[in-house]
Image (cartoon, helix red, strand yellow):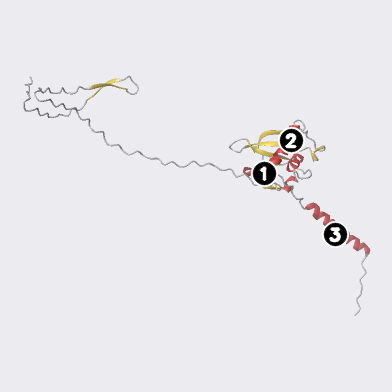
Amino acid sequence: MKVRRMALDPALTGRMAAMLVAAFVFLVLASPAPAHAITRSDVIARAGNWVQRRVGYSRRARVDGYRRDCSGMVSMAWSTGKSYTSRSIASRATRIPLSDLQPGDAVLTPGHVEIFEGWANAAHTRFVALEESNRRTGAVRRVKKFARRSAGLRYRGITEPPIVVAVYVPPVVPVVTPAEEPPAATAAMDVVVPAAGSPVTPEAPALPVTTDVATAGGPAADAVAPVAVVPVAVVPAADAVVPTLP
């Protein structure tokens, strides 16, 4: 059996080889570079270093190997290895809701990106940003409100899990209704039992007590509070002399 050998066109072979090389290069460039592991505290420290040094804003100049603009500062703080733009920086992160932002994350708005340091109020409507904003101020730390179309970014190289904030819920204290108090017992009157041979003098009836009662919208008025008199039968001794009452 004879096997025929096919002759390949050298030009076609060259074109196929060039296409394979181009496809390989495209795949390498399109694949995201592996994230450099970094902690949240390191991100804040790296961004804060530019603020302390007052690194000026520039779209061309570099410092510490990174471009001195907003996305270059975020790239430096995340230690990505190169300067990304405000459009491409999202490829190194995961989008998250603004309410889930943690120190070391970033806030992305169209044309700008900044490092999120923390919340500035309890309502989570203001935050502390570390950013390169313009040539006049350079790297700054400031309190800001969220702009329209803002989104949160979490760098994939962050090694620390999100911080879980515990919310304190006060215990429910049951309302105890006090039991009705029984009516006050009538105070017993003092009964004097005379000794043998002593005359019995009847007790004088109790006098009414005058108290000052405050009236609404007027001065205090005299009010008479009668006191109940409980008659008590007193049995004299056998040899007691009972006087005749007038």
Image position of 9 with respect to 132: above or below: below
Which of the numbered marks, if any, corresponds to residue 20?
A: 3
Left or right, residue 21 beside residue 113: right
Q: Tell me where residue 174 appears, x and y as whole percent.
A: 41, 42
Judged by depth in the image, the label closer to the viewer, 2 or 3, is 2
Left or right, residue 85 beside residue 149: right
Q: Is residue 21 visible?
A: yes
Judged by depth in the image, the label closer to the viewer, 1 or 2, is 2
Q: CA distance from mark 2 to mark 3?
A: 45 Å
**Counting residues from the N terminus, which is met first, the one under dot 1 or under dot 2?**
2
Q: Tell me where residue 100 appears, x and y as whole percent.
A: 63, 44
- Residue at mark 2: 49
Q: Quarter-wise, where is residue 51 in the image?
A: top right
* Quadrant in which the N terminus is drawn: bottom right
Q: Amino acid at mark 3?
A: Leu
**Counting residues from the N terminus, which is met first, the one under dot 2 or under dot 3?**
3
**What secondary structure is found at the residue carrying circle 2?**
helix
Q: What is the crowding at mark 1: few (fewer than 14 residues within 10 Å), some, or many (at least 20)? A: many
Number of numbered discs on residues: 3
Query: Residue at horizontal 21%, vertical 22%?
Result: 208
Q: Tell me where residue 53 appears, x and y as whole percent.
A: 76, 32
Query: Residue at horizontal 72%, vertical 33%?
Result: 140
Q: What is the crowding at mark 3: few (fewer than 14 residues within 10 Å), some, or many (at least 20)? A: few
Q: CA distance from mark 1 to mark 2?
A: 22 Å
- Residue at mark 1: 152
Q: What is the crowding at mark 2: few (fewer than 14 residues within 10 Å), some, or many (at least 20)? A: some
Q: Amino acid at mark 1?
A: Gly
Q: Is residue 132 visible?
A: no
- Residues 163 and 214: in front is 163
Q: Quarter-wise, where is residue 21 in the image?
A: bottom right
